[in-house]
Image (cartoon, helix red, strand yellow):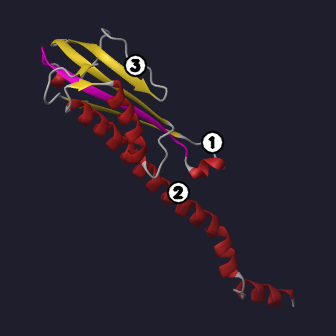
Amino acid sequence: MKMFSLKRALRDKRGLAALEFALMAPMMVLILFGSIELTELMATNRRAENTTASLADVVSRDTVITNAELTDLWAAAGALMYPNTATPMQMRISSVQVQTATEARVLWSDGYGGYAPRAAGSTFSLPSGMMVPGTSVVVAETSYRYNPPIGVFLDLAFDLKHVEYRRPRIADPVTRN
């Protein structure tokens, strides 16, 4: 009699789908939210990269940078980072003069959001292809701290750092007023 009920229990498939769903659901939900977060992280990184490139590009197209223009550039970051907030973004713009094929020095620098300006006259490392003596380079640097919404449950944050180099287009070097 006991063998009969054991065989019947082994053949009984009722509730198997519910058990499989209970085992798979947490993993499926994790993959869903993970893919959404990864997509948002990549989009935020792209916006931060575009902001850095825009800062360098705007300064390289000018001849003299004023305080008012810098204030406008810092404010423009908010529009460029939308729909993210620009509050956690640190920005720095520097003009670097190449002295020799191995030495470059900062002419001027301004920082915003926690980035300190580089000291005028300090040495600066540029990529070797930009080390053309007698020329200058506009350098824009940003750092953006991305805290994903899932970070409420996990202690998770990403620092998105970008550096862009541009040659001045009108005046070499771009001066600071």
Q: Taking 47 as reference, is 175 left or right?
A: left
Mark 3 residue crowding within 10 angstroms, few (<14) / some (14–19) / many (20+)? some
Q: Is residue 128 visible?
A: no
**Which stretch is magenta?**
132-147
Q: Determine the secondary structure under disc 2.
A: helix
Q: CA distance from mark 3 to mark 2?
A: 37 Å
Residue at figure coordinates x 57%, y 66% from the top left: 28
Amino acid under disc 3: Pro
Queried whether the magenta region covers residue 143, the answer comes back as yes
Between residues 7 and 95, which one lies in front from this camera angle?
Answer: 95
Horizontal side of 153 relative to 168 (left or right) equals right
Instruction: Describe the element under mark 3 as helix, strand or loop.
Output: loop
Question: Which element is circle 1 on?
Answer: loop
Q: Is residue 48 above or below residue 108?
A: below
Residue 155 is tagged as 1
Question: What is the C-alpha distance between the residues marked 1 and 2?
Answer: 15 Å
Q: Of label 1 and label 2, which has the lower sequence position?
A: 2
Front residue of 123 and 172: 172
Circles 3 and 1 in contact, beta carbons < 8 Å? no
Give residue 54's quadrant in the image: top left
Residue depicted at 41% across the width and 38% down the height: 75
Q: Is residue 19 magenta?
A: no
Give the residue pinned by disc 2.
Answer: 34
Residue 86 image offset from top left, x and y in percent: 47, 41
Amino acid type of the residue that numbered disc 2 sits on in the rendered structure: Gly
- Residue 105 point in image, percent of width and height: 26, 12
Q: Residue furthest right?
A: 1
Left/right placement of residue 169 relative to residue 111 reads left
Mark 3 vs 2, N-terminal side: 2
Identify the residue position indicated by label 3 in the image: 117
Q: Inspect this view and state whether residue 88 appears.
A: yes
Q: Could you tell me what secondary structure mostly forms the magenta stretch?
A: strand
